[in-house]
Amino acid sequence: MAAVFAALRVLLGLFFLLTGAAKLSDRLSADLHRHMQSQFVRFADVFPLKEFGYKPEAGRYLEAVGWIEVVAGLLLAVGPQLLQEISNFVLTVVMIGAIYTLLVLKEPVAMCAPATVCLGLLLLLNIRGRAAPAKPKFE
């Protein structure tokens, strides 16, 4: 079972690495990068800290999220355990923010599905890592 969770961790980490890279550069997919640029203009308008007077510039917001996903995805996939746990937490916060943003923008539920699935998998990895150790059997 540990191998399944290790594979899930690596695949999820690589997924975030690629999605972050797509936000940072148009080399993977020019259309996707342009789409992300236009989406982050909308996302910046509903940024959670806007209520406190901070509204990020859309391009920098896209870049920041891209770098967070690249670094955290890489650490989740191949980093030492402590950095895997930290990156899992960081990516969990990013996915909660993504879901919040999509809900505030009143996007269809289908648009929330990828972020929700990713959040669920991150939480599964987190819970699995914190499970109580098996009790030894005495005969």
Image (cartoon, helix red, strand yellow):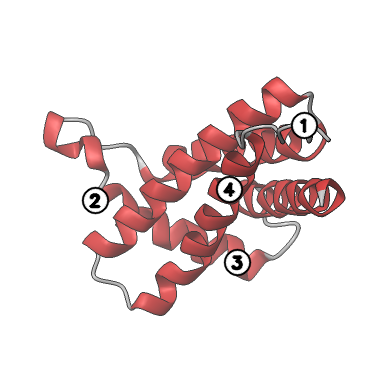
Amino acid on which disc 2 is placed: Asp
- Does residue 6 appear to the left or right of 38 in the view shown? right
Inter-mark Cα distance, 3 to 4? 24 Å
Inter-mark Cα distance, 3 to 1? 51 Å
Rendered position, 111 above or below 78: below
Residue denoted by label 4: 122
The mark that comes first in sequence, 3 or 2, is: 3
Report the label total: 4
Inter-mark Cα distance, 3 to 2? 20 Å
Tell me the SS state at disc 3: helix
What residue lies at 27% left-to-right and 63% top-to-bottom? Answer: 103
Q: Residues within 10 Å of mark 2 (few under 14, many from 20)?
A: some
Tell me the SS state at disc 1: loop
The image quarter in which residue 83 lies: top right
- Of circles 3 and 4, the one toward us is 4
Amino acid on which disc 1 is placed: Pro
Inter-mark Cα distance, 2 to 4? 27 Å
Inter-mark Cα distance, 2 to 1? 54 Å
The mark that comes first in sequence, 1 or 4, is: 4
- Does residue 62 appear to the left or right of 134 in the view shown? left
Amino acid on which disc 3 is placed: Leu
Tags 2 and 4 touching, CB below 8 Å: no
Residue denoted by label 3: 32
Residue denoted by label 1: 136
